[in-house]
């Protein structure tokens, strides 16, 4: 079995891809070779996915690829990359009429790439245990969250009854009716602050 | 009409803004500025309101939530680790039912 080598190769690819995502400058246009690097990474991901599907079966049999939660995560990430690639294709984006909308849409789709470092969770066993136990712990904190919410509600209602609208009060000159200004800011008053 | 401070965001004028402000005080972010502003516009004794939010909310309830998360996290992690030791330790990430296949 070569699965240890396979696993560490996968992790290496993910870490390298995270590095290329991190050094990217969003203000400058993407250099052409980075585009190629993207495609190489996508190819590597697809290769890994195909190997797993060949080994495990796609969806029908027991223990198949798409029956494991973590593999579904991998699958969605790779498929979103292909989806982005398909919509980025110039022939397909001409239909919008060359308006300002198309770059915005493409940028939104590119945001799917931030999910890629998530794949380290799939690859490292300790990380998977950590995430699973965090999700399992969620139902147990329900009561505390409810108590916290009621605390917020009680104090919000109390403040609403006592203090609503007060922060709009400002010092006003009674002879002219203008607000008094100090260092470019209007002064609040009504409590301990006395207007002269 | 005048605006509220912080681009009209800090106020207690309706329930949503009020909950936002209580949340802000619970995170201990700038709560003393808010207290000063209410002392200027309402009464200097309003510190009772803000200090009790900070004590009950930030010091007590927030840490209670964290403690509950921590204890349940530890518990489920122990269970998962125990279940994992029984299983095949060196299995591939996605191979969950390897043993059953081998038995067949």
Image: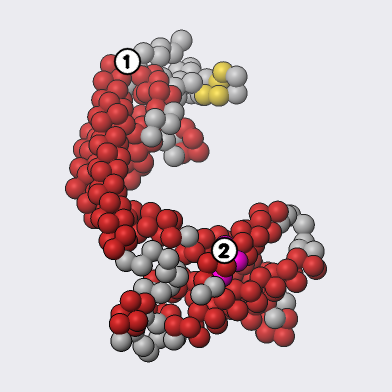
Residue drawn at x 45%, y 70% is B92
Where does the C terminus of chain B fall, quadrant-wise?
bottom left
Residue A136: image x %, image y %? Answer: 28, 57
**Label 1: chain letter:** B
Residue A98: quadrant of the picture: bottom right
- For the stretch drawn in magenta, the main secondary structure is helix
Q: Residues within 10 Å of mark 1 (few under 14, many from 20)?
A: some
Q: Is residue A3 located in the magenta-colored stretch of the structure?
A: no
Q: What's the mark number on residue A8?
A: 2
Q: Residue furthest bottom?
A: A60
Name the colour scheme. secondary structure
- The answer to which of B73 and A24 lies nearer the viewer is B73
Q: Is residue B46 visible?
A: no
Outermost residue toward the top in this view? A196
Tell which of B37 and B84 is nearer to you: B84
Q: CA distance from mark 2 to mark 1?
A: 63 Å
**Image quarter (top left, top right, bottom left or bottom right) of the N terminus of chain B:** top left
Residue at 49% from the left image edge and 35% from the top image edge: B6
Q: Residues within 10 Å of mark 2 (few under 14, many from 20)?
A: few
x, y percent for residue A160: 27, 36
* Tag of residue B44: 1
Q: Which residues are magenta?
A: A6-11
């Amino acid at each position: 079995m070569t699965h240890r080598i396979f696993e560490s190769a996968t992790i290496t690819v993910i870490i390298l891809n995270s590095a290329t995502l991190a050094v990217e400058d969003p203000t400058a246009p993407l250099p052409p070779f980075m585009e190629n690097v993207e495609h190489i990474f996508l190819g590597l991901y697809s290769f890994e996915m195909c190997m797993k599907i060949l080994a495990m079966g796609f969806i029908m049999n027991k223990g198949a690829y798409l029956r494991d939660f973590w593999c579904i995560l991998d699958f969605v990430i790779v498929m979103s990359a292909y989806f982005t690639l398909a919509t980025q294709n110039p022939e397909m984006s001409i239909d919008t009429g060359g308006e300002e909308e198309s770059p915005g849409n493409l940028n939104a789709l590119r945001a799917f790439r931030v999910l890629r470092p998530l794949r380290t969770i799939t690859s490292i066993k300790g990380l998977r245990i950590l995430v699973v136990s965090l999700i399992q712990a969620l139902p147990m904190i329900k009561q505390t969250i409810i108590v916290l919410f009621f605390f917020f509600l009680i104090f919000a209602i109390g403040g609403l009854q006592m203090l609503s609208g007060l922060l709009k009060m400002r010092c006003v000159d009674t002879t002219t009716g203008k607000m008094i200004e100090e260092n470019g800011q209007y002064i609040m008053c009504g409590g301990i602050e006395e207007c002269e | 009409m005048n605006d509220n401070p912080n681009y009209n965001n800090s106020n207690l004028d309706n329930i949503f803004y009020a909950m936002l402000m209580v949340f802000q005080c619970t995170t201990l972010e700038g709560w003393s500025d808010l207290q000063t502003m209410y002392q200027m516009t309402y009464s200097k004794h309003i510190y009772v309101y803000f200090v009790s939010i900070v004590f009950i909310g930030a010091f007590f309830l927030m840490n209670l939530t964290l403690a509950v998360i921590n204890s349940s996290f530890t518990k489920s992690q122990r269970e998962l680790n125990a279940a994992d030791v029984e299983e095949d330790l060196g299995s591939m990430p996605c191979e969950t039912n390897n043993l059953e296949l081998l038995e067949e």
